[in-house]
Amino acid sequence: MTKNIAIITGANKGIGIEIARGLGKRGLTVLVGARSAERGETAAATLRDEGLDAHFLHLDVTDETIVAAAAKQVEEQYGKLDVLVNNAAIALADGDWNTSELTVATARKVFETNVLGVVAVTNAFLPLIRKSDAGRIVNVSSEIGSLSFMTDPSKPFYTQQCGAYGASKSALNMLTVSWSKELEPTGIKINAVTPGFTATDLNGNQGTRRPVDAAAVAVDMALIGDDGPNGGFFHKGVEYLDSPVVPW
């Protein structure tokens, strides 16, 4: 039988490589999506050294030509895709993160990766996901993109301005809901997850959670059964969130 195939974008380090590791341990063939061939190959080799079936996939989510080439490669090599985890993201700001200091150039760059990149990758790979017996898409979002969370004075980060990064995650959440409505009749399930405040290069390693713990929710949602949720927002073990379902 053909093994299930998973792609994780931004998988050469941090939460991304931990998601790849988690899915690999569950028996999936994992394609380590990365812009840099050197870093991607190194990450895939690390996972192979651990006994996992891992391979580098050149994937720059901001380059539609590269995305199309990656989709063609996966089609030729595997003929389908079972799991897509949209993990690649950046967090940029101007000045002291004051929204009044945010430049259009910075906002555009953030949205190119965090929103438009997800649109490009998801729609390019959807034909292959439709060929899966149980296609799953996981969008790695953030509670910073939750309007309910960020307007609750009792929650951490309430006083923070989240700028283009937060706005991009709010947009990603809405796209998740939108895709879920279209895909509902097909059996493909798409959900958003938040890893919580995790120590990665994205935040200068200032987070309080470990990447391995933050990755667990994405692994779980990538492997949900036919009775699993569709179009939801979830976390696992984030202490300041009240239930497994994150408010929009």
Image (tube, rainbow, N blue to C red):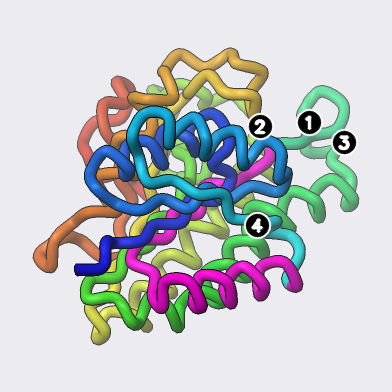
Q: SS for tag 1?
A: loop
**Residue 169 visible in image:** no
Q: SS for tag 2?
A: loop
Residue range corresponding to the magenta coloring? 65-90
* First along the sequence among labels 4 and 2: 4
Residue 68 point in image, percent of width and height: 66, 75
Q: Does the residue at mark 4 contact the one at mark 2 (Cβ under 8 Å)?
A: no
Determine the residue located farthest toward the left in the rendered image: 227
| Occupied quadrant, residue 73 | bottom right
Q: Residue at x 29, y 62 (%)?
A: 4
Residue 221 point in image, percent of width and height: 27, 51
- Say the numbered circle drawn on residue 59: 4
Q: Does the residue at mark 3 contact the one at mark 1 (Cβ under 8 Å)?
A: yes
- In the rendered image, residue 144 lying in the magenta stretch gets the answer no
- Say the numbered circle drawn on residue 161: 2
Q: CA distance from mark 1 to mark 2?
A: 7 Å
Amino acid of disc 2? Gln
- Say the numbered circle drawn on residue 98: 1
Q: CA distance from mark 3 to mark 4?
A: 31 Å
- Say the numbered circle drawn on residue 101: 3
Amino acid of disc 4? Leu
- In the rendered image, residue 81 lying in the magenta stretch gets the answer yes
239 sits to left or right of 71 = left
